[in-house]
Image: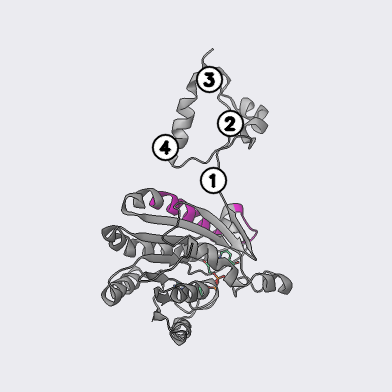
Amino acid sequence: MTIDFKDRVAIVTGAGGGLGREYALELAARGAKVVVNDFGGARDGSGGSASAAEVVVAEIEAKGGTAVANPASVTDFGAVEAMVADTLSRWGRVDILINNAGVLRDKSFAKMTLDDFRFVLDVHLMGSVNCTKAVWDAMRDAGYGRILMTSSSTGLYGNFGQANYGAAKLGLVGLMKTLALEGAKSNIHVNSIFPVAGTRMTEDIMPEEMLRLLAPKNVVPAALYLVSNAAPTSTILGAGAGGFHAAHVTLTHGIMVPEADRTVETVAARIAEITDCTGETVPTNGAEQGGLVMSRLGELKG
Ligand code: NAD
């Protein structure tokens, strides 16, 4: 199977460097017209310059591809709306949105200011909401859309010093889960990726040897699959250094407890059974989880 993006129009946020740049280059190489969005600030989100995106556009054009630079901050809904309006008037459609822009303001929670907490939520979570909101109607009207949220192992599993980032990154998975349901009838597929790559975001967090193994291009196959015609929906893929994985939000079989025994002590005594992973499932929506409990009420009789 060959996956191409011929005649597709893609917006990649934060594509002036790191992973976004790799996504933009490969999308263009496979035929997509690409909006290379980047605010061009420092790793903590300070500053800003149009040149980061322009350099990547020049790279794409030098290879015969088609791209346009856009310096909007994803935190500015008006600027994001203008970017989408410009894309629609230039190329008539928006098929793909990769929400990739990101910043870090790491500190232990005790030392983290609420401003730093809000800022990181604003860029990652609200930035992705802004961009998704801005393309949603056009995708729905066209009956086609592919949206990728960039999550992180921090959101899924936690990492010391990244409470703000982790909250934003798991928030994106929750956003994906509901948008995948709402987008299904319009052929809008929404997925998440949790990459691991050597970029300026990780250059002083990971040892040099590890960074060499973690070239950002190793993440591209998973990201592009998740925005291709063949993409699933509501899938969370991990990628990096040649590894590809899926993460699931699972539900254990748990226990059903008669009314008389529903005490704190019962939960304490049976916590190993409640958390036992044997036979766990992945509900496809929240209502299904409630339904699973209701379907087992019969176990309480007799
Ligand atoms: P990076 O710093 O190289 O790239 C992030 C890009 O986003 C930068 O070019 C930056 O200018 C841009 N950006 C920042 N704020 C912006 C804004 N408000 N509007 C538009 N652009 C903005 O880092 P990266 O490692 O390539 O990160 C890309 C994404 O992958 C991020 O969402 C990051 O959280 C996520 N991620 C990366 C790793 C990793 O190992 N590198 C792991 C997990 C998740």
Residue visible at 30% across and 57% down in the picture: 143
* In-front residue for pair 3/148: 3
Type of the residue with mark 4: Ala
Label 4: few (<14), some or many (≥20) within 10 Å?
Answer: few
Q: Which residue is mark 2?
A: 254
Disc 2 residue type (three-letter): Gly
First-in-chain label (4 vs 3): 4
Q: Position of residue 272 (x, y in %)?
A: 67, 33
Q: Quadrant of residue 159?
A: bottom right
Residue 146 x %, y %: 40, 60
The residue shown at (36%, 50%) is: 184
Tag 1 secondary structure: loop
Q: Amino acid at mark 1?
A: Val
Q: Of marks 1 and 2, which one's residue comes earlier in the chain?
A: 1
Mark 4 within 8 Å of ligand 1, using the beta carbon:
no
Whether tag 2 and tag 3 are in contact, CB under 8 A, the answer is: no
- Residue 176 falls within the magenta-colored stretch: yes
Looking at the image, is mark 3 or mark 1 earlier in the sequence? 1
Q: Which residue is mark 3?
A: 299
Amino acid at dot 3 = Glu
Q: Position of residue 104 (x, y in %)?
A: 56, 68
Query: Between marks 2 and 3, how big is the CA–CA gap?
Result: 12 Å
* Dots 2, 4 in contact, CB < 8 A: no
Bounds of the magenta segment: 157-179
Q: Secondary structure at mark 3?
A: helix
Compared to 268, does 82 lie above or below? below
159 horizontally vs 181: left or right: right
Q: Quadrant of residue 203?
A: bottom right
Point 36% across, 60% down: residue: 145
